[in-house]
Image (cartoon, rainbow, N blue to C red):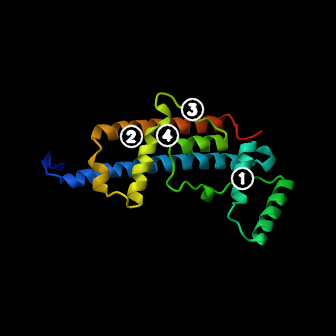
Amino acid sequence: LKIPRGQGYRTAEVEEDLVKILKANAYLLLYNLVESSIRAGLIEIYDTIHAAGLSFDDLTSELQIVLLQDLFPPDVAQVEGIAQRVHEFVRQTVKEEAVQFDPQKIKFAGNVDARKVRHICEEYGFSSKTRNIRGGDRLVEVKRERNYLAHGLKSFVESGRDVTYQDLDQIKRQVVSYVRQILNNIQRFINAKRYAV
């Protein structure tokens, strides 16, 4: 490890276990990059729809379904709660009020990989097409290692032991490229106003 000192550097040895721990942390950082980027992209769609003042009838069928799933989650047990939500929904629809999605309803629960991203793309109606990165296949590895670490199934030392810097660099490059292309797809979706009918 090189530590700045005056005009030069001093060097210090780094324990082998610390190196493994730092490599394992790369999985957490990459996973967080994926999940937070996709969430930010969806919130950008929500904000654009809200800023445009679109009503329920103005949305594509895909986004109408997303909104309905937000308003009527399957775990709502109380009849009064459902009745209130239906009443509010009907009132907003009849008055053609601007819809507002709830970003708090975006739930990933540690399961974001390329398959989940493709499902989100389909659900919202924007493209999942990417090029030159085999569909984000390294995201499965990032998600798996993140979940091992998050649930204590592996220690940080164990997770970082078998991965090389070159592997981490390849994984990072693919993940960043994949996320960038998905975010570009979201931006094209917004720019072309494909959220509205």
Indicate which disc residue 179 carries.
4
Q: Which residue is mark 1?
A: 67
Alpha carbon of mark 1 to alpha carbon of mark 3: how far?
Answer: 24 Å
Residue at left 24%, top 50%? Answer: 19
Indicate which disc residue 129 carries.
3
Report helix, strand or loop for mark 3. loop
Kind of residue at disc 2: Lys
Indicate which disc residue 8 carries.
none
Residue 167 placed where, x, y %? 32, 38
- Residue 26 vs residue 159, the one in the foreground: 159
Sequence-wise first label, 1 or 3: 1
Residue most extreme to the right: 94
Kind of residue at disc 1: Leu
Q: Is residue 144 left or right of residue 162?
A: right
Residue 95 vertical position relative to residue 165 in the rendered view, above or below: below
Report helix, strand or loop for mark 1. helix
Residue at left 46%, top 37%? Answer: 137
Foreground mark, 3 or 4, reads: 3
* Quadrant of the image containing the C terminus: top right
Residue at left 77%, top 64%? Answer: 85
Alpha carbon of mark 2 to alpha carbon of mark 3: how far?
Answer: 19 Å
